[in-house]
Image: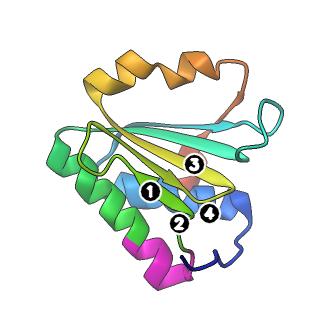
Amino acid sequence: MELNNYMEPEKLLAEIVRIADDRKAKDIVAMRVTEQTTLADYFVIMTGTSTTHIQSLSDEIEYKLKNNLGVNSHHIEGITSNWILMDYTTVVVNVFLSEAREMYALERMWGDAETVDVEKYLK
């Protein structure tokens, strides 16, 4: 496993949000979780329309971060499921199918976290 090239957490978050939006991710939500956990600075949650779509979302995020910015994931899991988790140390990305997103309800679980306005990254 290669070490992550460091990138400011908010810049990494912005890039992930832009890539996801370009790939037509639905309902992209970002939360600043530094007050709630030491796991990461930000969680990103998004929905794909099919297992193929969530796979292409995660593939594109991984590819562009690695090849364009030299940033490698620390860990990726769930590749063949309805929830793909991508750990970039400071930013954890959750790519869900709609039913799984509702079932795991991460937004409710981390409801006391500050919600980040992702629209500012899309302009």
N-terminal-most mark, 3 or 4: 4
* Residue 48 vs residue 104, the one in the foreground: 104
Image quadrant of residue 19? Answer: bottom left
Mark 3 secondary-structure assignment: strand
Q: Are marks 1 and 2 in contact (CB under 8 Å)?
A: yes
Q: Mark 1 or 4, which is nearer the eye?
A: 1
**Residue beneath disc 2:** 73
The residue at which mark 1 appears reads as 76
Q: Residue at x 33, y 66 (%)?
A: 60
Q: Around disc 2, counting alpha carbons within 10 Å, would you say few (fewer than 14), some (14 to 19), or many (20 or more)?
A: many
Indicate yes or no whether the magenta region holds residue 41: no
The residue labelled by disc 4 is: 12
For image coordinates 62% across by 39% down, the residue present is 117
What are the residue bounds of the magenta stretch? 63-71
Q: CA distance from mark 2 to mark 3?
A: 9 Å
Q: Which mark is residue 92?
A: 3
**Where does the image place residue 37, in percent across and percent down from the top left?**
77, 35
Q: Is residue 112 visible?
A: yes
Q: Earlier in the sequence, mark 3 or mark 1?
A: 1
Residue 64 in the image: above or below residue 16: below
